[in-house]
Amino acid sequence: MSLLIRNATVLTVDAADRVIEGGAVYVENGRIAAVGPSAGVEAAHAAGAGRVIDGRGKVVLPGFVSTHNHVGYTFFRGRAEDMGLGCVTGQYFPMATVASREERLAVGSLTYAELLKSGVTTTLEMEEEADVFAPFVESLGVRSFMGVMTFDVDVDAMAKDEYRYDEALREAQLRQAVDFAERWHGRADGRIRVMMTPNMTISSSPELLRASRETADRMGLRTSIHLGWGEYEVEVMQRLRGRSSFEYARDSGMLAADTVCAHCYVVADPDVDVLAASKAAVAHCPLMNAVRGHIAPVVEYRSRGIPVSLGIDNMFADHFEVLRACVTMARIKTGSATVMQCPEVLRLATMGGAEALGMGAEIGSIEPGKRADLQMLDYRRFGLTPTLDPVQNLVYHAHSKDVELVMVDGNVLVEDFELKTADARALIDDAGAAADAAWGRFVAKYGGIVAR
Ligand SMILES: [Zn+2]
């Protein structure tokens, strides 16, 4: 199967950040076979192309790689945004004790589809029972790193600020994570890669973190964990372990070059040293972090050589808002109106994610030989004219609604602004019903929308 997009503006995100006006991309057998000025690519490939798409007024760029997601946390959309970090112990963990796997699947499937429609071709999804999403990921056609977000803390005690760790729970959680890896790692034509993803330091005993690392190394899996997400985390770690969250994660063997550390906005100087020495990547989630009142020092991370990628985290569905927040938050943090220029943001959203996931040679840019994970936006729409600089228009003015076509491995999954591999209306209705049912049981168990 082969496909040619011609006469488009192509944002390659190659080493030179080449932007090709009047460009073409030729895709064959799931990979990018050629990219360049349209005339040359057409002369070589138009005759043999199974399909030709006219790209006039369109902009083609690599699919976004979102390195931090909890798709099922759309349960909390419209409920946790104004709650501050009290939602972590008051809603997120308690919901895991009442939501059914079917409800989680319904809500998370909607979010996977929303992200795909927003140009996100690869997600790093970590969540309690993330394994439930694997068949949907396979049928939707996206690429996803996936981890069961393990914990061995007594959840109901933690909601009361008491910390007890349970060996039986730990064993059960690790078994679920390993079973998931054995069943799904490398499946869906290699699009699913399972990871070991302990939730966070306060919910993990040293034994859980060490076992997660040993399992990851033994099975060849990558890792991820939340780090530096709150003052409360810092306080609890000092109380329980007498050191910072970063030091505890390092000392328990969690941090390595295969680790994606989510958030990293509450950091002391020694923590930045720990991060830099570990070679781990940061999943910067500027939109969600801003909602929580925080900004990660990503300009400093970049200057220290710490790999930075972007994540949407949860509840949000328009990944273009993440790019904008990456710019605005960096500027507020540094007091400079010119840091974090658009080409850099586009790179973090694409290649940055690819490299954080060890896939820099496979995805993240439009270059011959890479997998054809692409998106195409229609720029002949309100908000995008004039197009004096397609990259600035992308970062400052584009939205999910402008994404006309998305492909993964050369398979077209969104076309004419519509999902091709799932029924959008059914996903919306099922997710709404599932969230209503789960919240009904949550309120019955905890006496309100916050567990205390
Ligand atoms: Zn998270």
Image: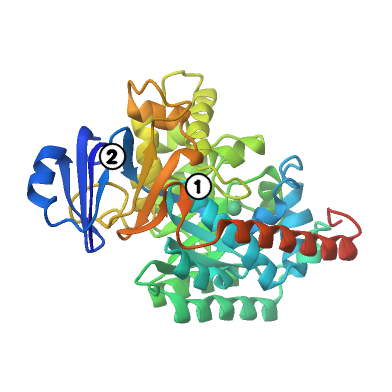
Query: Helix, strand, or loop for circle 2?
Result: loop
Q: Is residue 200 visible?
A: no
* Label 2 sits on residue: 55
Q: If the image is split into quadrants, where does the C terminus sit?
A: bottom right
Q: Position of residue 289 (x, y in %)?
A: 60, 39
Q: CA distance from mark 2 to mark 1?
A: 29 Å
Q: Looking at this view, is 98 or 335 the one in front?
A: 98
Q: How many marks?
A: 2
The residue sitting at 53% across, 57% down in the picture is 112
Quickly name the residue at label 1: 311
Verify CB contact (< 8 Å) between mark 2 and mark 1.
no
Q: Position of residue 422 (x, y in %)?
A: 51, 62
Residue 256 placement (x, y as % from top left): 41, 59
Q: Secondary structure at mark 1?
A: loop
Is residue 6 shown to the viewer in this render? Answer: yes
> Height in image: 143 above or below 54?
below
Position of 426 relative to 219 (above/below): above
Using the image as rendered, state which of residue 255 and residue 198 is in the foreground: 198
Q: Is residue 409 left or right of residue 38?
A: right
Is the CB of the residue bearing disc 1 within 8 angstroms of ligand 1?
yes
Q: Position of residue 179 (x, y in %)?
A: 52, 81
Q: Is residue 138 left or right of residue 114?
A: left
The numbered mark, 2 or 1, whose residue comes first in the sequence reads 2
Depth check, mark 2 against mark 1: the one in front is 2
